[in-house]
Amino acid sequence: MKRAFITGITGQDGAYLSQFLLSKDYEVYGLVRRSSWSEGMDARLRWLGVADDVTLVDGNLTDLSSLERLLRQIRPDEIYNLAAQSFVKASWNQPLLTGAVTGLGAVNMLEAARLECPQARFYQASSSEMFGLAQEPTQTEKTAFYPRSPYAVAKLYAHWMAINYRESFGMFTCSGILFNHESPLRGIEFVTRKITDGVARIKLGLQEKLTLGNLHAKRDWGHSRDYVRAMWMMLQQVEPEDYVIATGRTTSVLDFCRLAFTHVGLRAEEHIAVDAHYLRPAEVDYLIGDASKARAKLGWSPEVTLEQLVQEMVDCDLKRLRDELKITAGIARS
């Protein structure tokens, strides 16, 4: 039975990856940063029904000693470094924290692996945001990077350090340059969940408007469930390499809204408002990935369409809000 160690296990990708690895008969361990409020920490794992099947261990990406201790105890076969300060807009307000966790935190994880389990296979979660002001119409593994946020800069540092550890120490390190991937488990602060939650609330009469920033930004959106499968596939190869993971289809924020509103029988333009407060200081206007290498070498391709993704997210938000309304009504009656 293989052992996997996941940082960021309580996030969207960490939860889906845990579910996937458990289906492959892995032992799954996940790093959690304890705080004074830990209730609900494993909510995504519980939503997928796997919370009782994973082992959560205390540590912190900014504390090398805790990472060394855990790897010494667990001796994982595979390490997936998914943890980050991953909200792009917040990275301008917290650039030092973003650098410490998203950038240096990845190097702490790499160094701990080098010292304690150098034979473990290491996955680094890189990001399409590293392409930023895209230098080519379609982005591949060979496209030049042009990061446009503290988050993207930190991710780029981590990306190149993973390559450096591979080339300097012979470690099996892979970076997945993942384009935007979403699900019902996406945090409400991200634009896709903000849209589907807002659509559900408007449909149920709980709010009137959905307020957003740049409606014309275009992204290549896939489903997290498809993308964690690609992470695992990278670590099963004979040689470590980096891969772009994307659908090859780009869609504007406005068109994402239209798909969501249409699904509930509403017209998007009647409910959307724009507020400059939500604009980024430096915008990334257009991203679309070419995953030809992943298709050819990994045999990977996305299974969930954008339309299916949007419908699943809206339906889950509708169900959640209806359940909350039933609970509120029940309390009121009692």
Image: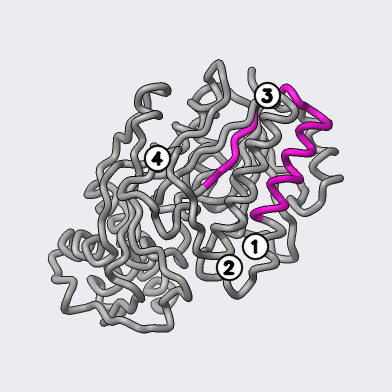
**Magenta residue span:** 102-126
Q: Are marks 2 and 1 in contact (CB under 8 Å)?
A: yes
The picture places residue 38, in percent across and down from the top left corner, at 68, 60
Q: Are marks 2 and 4 in contact (CB under 8 Å)?
A: no
- Name the residue beneath numbered marker 2: 91
Mark 4 vs mark 3: in front:
4
Mark 1 vs mark 4: in front:
4
Label 2 to label 1, Cα distance in Å? 6 Å
Disc 1 residue type? Thr
Label 2 to label 4, Cα distance in Å? 25 Å
Choose top left, top right, bottom left or bottom right for residue 96.
Answer: bottom right
Of marks 3 and 1, which one's residue comes earlier in the chain? 3
- Name the residue beneath numbered marker 4: 140
Of residues 265 and 96, the one nearer the viewer is: 96
Label 4 to label 3, Cα distance in Å? 29 Å
- Name the residue beneath numbered marker 1: 98
Q: Is 198 left, or right, of 170 in this rendering?
A: left
- Name the residue beneath numbered marker 3: 77
Mark 2 vs mark 3: in front:
2
Choose top left, top right, bottom left or bottom right for residue 151.
Answer: bottom right
Q: Quadrant of the N terminus?
A: top right
Of marks 2 and 3, which one's residue comes earlier in the chain? 3
Q: Residue at position x 60%, y 24% from top?
A: 26
